[in-house]
Amino acid sequence: MNAQPWISVVGIGEDGPAGLGEEARRHIAEAEVLAGGRRHLALVPPSEATRVPWGSPLEDSVRGLAAYRGRKVVVLASGDPSWFGVAKVVLRHFPREEVAVLPHVSAFQLAAARLGWAIEEVGTVSLHNMPATRLLRELAPGRRLLVLTSGPRMPATIADLLARHGHAAARVRVFGHLGGPRETMWEGGTAEVAGQRFPILNLVALALPRETEATEDAAVLDLDDDAFEHDGNITKAEYRAAAIARLGPGPGRRLWDVGAGSGAMAITWLYRCGTGAATAIEKRPDRAVFIRRNAARLGTPELRLVEGEVPEALPAEEVPDAVFVGGGLATPGLLRACFERLAPGGRLVAHAVTMGGEQALYRMYEEVGGTLQRLSLSRAELRGDHLLWRPLAPVTQYAVTRR
């Protein structure tokens, strides 16, 4: 017998139940338990329902809903709970057939409507519990972005970030209390934001200029080798691009970067994926320091770092969609262990620069098939008055798909 939904995740706006459809209002009226943030709970008139305000961490509060199984539980959330909302957290802990999701109009939709922007052409980002540097990988000339923030100071932090990374000419709009009686909208340039006062609940709309300015920090966005702190153990940018093309980045896909060094491959993956995930696995503590610093400075705070020897350190609780092995090829059984942990259809790519590493790749090729190719690259460099080609060490690339 199929389970029936006993948890309803109901999206609600600043205008409270009055702005909801009949079905959502019925769920709230029949609720025996109302859970959510204190602001959301305050939008609903008093009733006999037990009220459960979220605590910290949110995961623990959501997990605690299991105590109310068998009762009608309504979780209140902002706008569309499946769009950077709590629905994802609820569905991590309860089966899909036990959860009903009733979306409301999101703040992103409301802002796009106010601005006349086609929402499919706009980037949407949430900075709730995230540093402003998370925006770095979204910045591109001429792009439009809608950004949920985490407080009244965040618009000024965002404006400063834009100016430092070549987008000082961006147009900034800050919406407050979207969809409610107290809705506000401020518009100005990046230099004007710092002197303004904004509501705690705000959304920032950014229209980036078509041309970026030449600032030192703007070069970071190209993810060249110099963008990363490293000790020389880094997969060069051109070879990273070749590996990423084979690995197949995409929304929601997880990469393991094994022998991560500086974390450059994992960070590049996150830039290319948008909503992807990455785990960097590194045994050396000094290189782990580089990974942490690079992730923080380059706007990939969600990058997970695992320290330890492989294959023992491979996370048992994760199933990667892609694995890149850039170090530790001589470790017995490493490539096979990574391959066997892949999700079906997942891709393994490994690079070798030494003959010992090449031998490990060839043995794997003999065991499970795949492709082998040699990549060679030269960069033009000035030596005195002359422009010369400087060859980089060639890389042997192995790639295989798990069927």
Image (cartoon, rainbow, N blue to C red):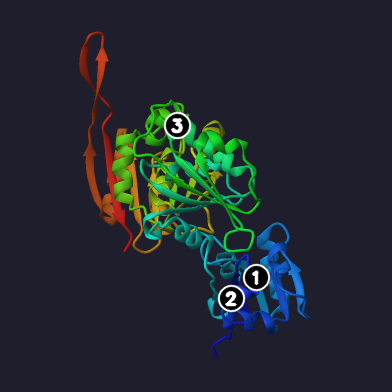
Determine whether, in the image, residue 70 is placed left or right of residue 334.
right
Q: Secondary structure at mark 1?
A: helix
Determine whether, in the image, residue 361 is placed left or right of residue 145.
left
Q: Give how far across and how far down residue 343 sits, in percent.
A: 40, 62
Residue at x 44%, y 39% (from the top left corner): 170
The amino acid type found where label 3 is placed reads: Phe
Determine whether, in the image, residue 11 is placed left or right of residue 322.
right
Residue 383, relative to residue 120: is it above or below? above
Give the quadrant of the C terminus. bottom left
Residue at which label 1 appears: 16
Q: Nearer the viewer, residue 355 or 377?
A: 377
Real-space Cα distance between discs 3 and 2?
A: 48 Å
Residue 72 in sight: no
Q: Nearer the viewer, residue 301 or 180?
A: 180
Residue at which label 2 appears: 20
Do callouts 2 and 1 mark residues in contact (Cβ within 8 Å)? yes
The amino acid type found where label 2 is placed reads: Leu
Give the quadrant of the N terminus. bottom right
Within 10 Å of disc 2 (Cα), the crowding (few <14, some 14-19, many 20+) is some
Residue at which label 3 appears: 228
N-term mark: 3 or 1: 1
Residue 79, relative to residue 208: is it above or below? below
Real-space Cα distance between discs 3 and 1?
A: 47 Å
Within 10 Å of disc 1 (Cα), the crowding (few <14, some 14-19, many 20+) is some
Taking the view exactly as shown, the residue that stands out farthest to the top is 384
Q: Nearer the viewer, residue 34 or 208?
A: 208
